[in-house]
Amino acid sequence: MDYRVEIEFLIHLKSPLHIGTGVGLTGILDKTTIRDKRERDGLVYIPGSSIKGRLRDHYEKLSMIFTYSITSSCYGQNNPCRKARIEDCCAICQIFGSPFHEGRFNFYDAEIDKDSLIPLSEDDIKMFQVDKRNANMISRSLRITRPKRFFTTEVCSPWLVFKGKINGTITLQNPKGVIPAEFALLMASIKFMDRLGGAKSRGIGVIETRIEEAKINGSLIQEKEISESIRNLQ
Ligand SMILES: [Zn+2]
């Protein structure tokens, strides 16, 4: 059976957030925060690829804990499903992709949620959205001795709120219940996301997420049903 899944969620920053332009590669030494390269509004955003990476991490861990709820799973990309059709692969491969198949889900860039930041105007947000941070502190924490080398790192201001969106279709052979475990795990993974970006040990990149709207095959799923389905996994 096919399930068309759509989820919107808010990401509240609880500390400054640093997402370098080379997410996960250049990490903390990257000087500039990623900005809207589409040059539409110049506002910072969180790339969908960062969100996808964190979600995959949580989803794999949760799948391992609740493994009996999921018919077949491959953990990590070490031993991915080798089915010819993506529809026959496990939820992890279907949602996030594998070396053999492209994932069936879209992870959109999370953009600043202006509604959450009223009464600030777009100009206010633009003026205060980033903050400079002396990265010398960061290199010290990594025990790198680099006297006389100072980096300034741009970080997103800790009060920003972003709106994220993911959607896609998942095919399940033996779904159980109205809200299948594979879907509940995805919702749980979003709720468990508490970090983003680089420099994780320095009190940077702490986030809190809230699910705004979730739909399966066009029908709204209530918050209560979501928590119930997550509880039922245990
Ligand atoms: Zn798989």
Image: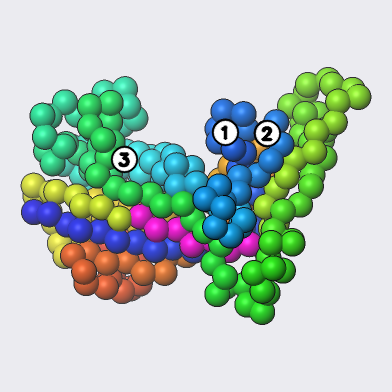
Q: Which residues are magenta?
A: 160-166
Q: Residue at x 44, y 42 (%)?
A: 49
State the scheme by which the image is colored: rainbow
Q: Nearer the viewer, mark 3 or mark 1?
A: 1
Task: Measure the C-alpha gap from mark 3 to mark 1.
Answer: 20 Å
Graded by Cα atoms within 10 Å as few (under 14), some (14 to 19) or many (20 or more), the crowding at tag 2 reads many
- Nearest the eye: 129 or 59: 129
Where on the picture, by quarter, is residue 65?
Answer: top left
Asked whether the viewer can see residue 43, the reply is yes
- Nearest the eye: 38 or 196: 38
The answer to whether the residue bearing label 2 lies less than 8 angstroms from the nearest atom of ligand 1 is no
| Magenta span dominant secondary structure | strand
Q: Residue at x 66, y 37 (%)?
A: 199
Graded by Cα atoms within 10 Å as few (under 14), some (14 to 19) or many (20 or more), the crowding at tag 1 reads some
Q: Residue furthest front?
A: 39
> Between disc 1 and disc 2, whose residue precedes?
1
- Helix, strand or loop status at disc 2: loop
Is there a contact, CB below 8 Å, between mark 1 and mark 2?
Answer: yes
Graded by Cα atoms within 10 Å as few (under 14), some (14 to 19) or many (20 or more), the crowding at tag 3 reads some
The magenta stretch spans residue 162: yes
Residue named by callout 3: 96
Quadrant containing the C terminus is: bottom left
Amino acid, disc 1:
Gly
Amino acid, disc 3:
Phe
Residue named by callout 1: 22
- Helix, strand or loop status at disc 3: helix
Label annotation for residue 209: none
> Between disc 2 and disc 3, whose residue precedes?
2
Task: Measure the C-alpha gap from mark 1 to mark 2.
Answer: 7 Å
Residue named by callout 2: 30
> Between disc 3 and disc 1, whose residue precedes?
1
